[in-house]
Amino acid sequence: MELMKKGQVGGIQMFIMAIVGVAVILAVGLIVLGELQSAATTNGLASTTATSTVASNATGSIITKMATIPTWIGILITVALAFIVLGYFYNRG
């Protein structure tokens, strides 16, 4: 029984580390995209205003779509924790 508990704790730790890694990558990606959008808005990336506006709008669209990822991460965390709890009670009985 002790071995199973250690395995479950290790599984939870790996799960938490994976979620933290995804969150860090997502945060860095959003920061970089925000800086790119800012640079495109101030005409730093393009020589013409029309190109700068298109680049800024495209980057803004990507940022908006990436902003929905935390909602899915929350759902995945809830489902994974439910499986861990159900697995614990299933193996216990």
Image: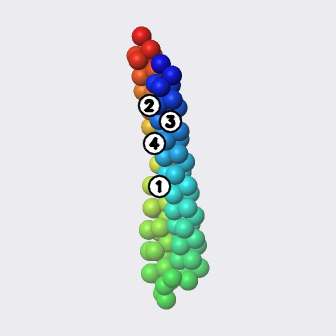
What number is the disc on residue 72?
Answer: 4
Task: For marks 2 and 4, give the one nearer the viewer.
Answer: 2
Q: Residue 39 at what x, y percent from top left? A: 57, 77
Does 67 appear above or below 59? above
Mark found first going from the N terminus, 3 or 4: 3
- Residue at left 49%, top 89%? 47
Q: Is residue 81 visible?
A: no
**Local crowd size for mark 3, using a 10 Å CA cut-off: few (<14), some (14–19), many (≥20):** few
Mark found first going from the N terminus, 4 or 1: 1
Task: Measure the alpha-carbon separation of dots 2 and 1.
Answer: 21 Å
Which residue position is annotated with label 2?
79
Name the kind of residue labelled 2 in the image.
Val
Name the kind of residue labelled 4 in the image.
Trp
Task: Measure the alpha-carbon separation of dots 4 and 1.
Answer: 11 Å
Which residue position is annotated with label 3?
10
Name the kind of residue labelled 3 in the image.
Gly
Task: Name the quadrant of the C terminus.
Answer: top left
For the view shown, which residue lies furthest in the bottom direction?
Answer: 47
* SS for callout 1: helix
Q: Residue 61 at what x, y percent from top left? A: 45, 62
Does 30 appear above or below 71? below
* SS for callout 2: helix
Task: Measure the alpha-carbon separation of dots 2 and 4.
Answer: 11 Å
Q: Is residue 65 visible?
A: yes
Which residue position is annotated with label 1?
66
- Residue at left 45%, top 55%? 65
Q: Is residue 87 left or right of residue 28?
A: left
Mark found first going from the N terminus, 3 or 2: 3
Q: Residue 24 at what x, y percent from top left? A: 55, 55
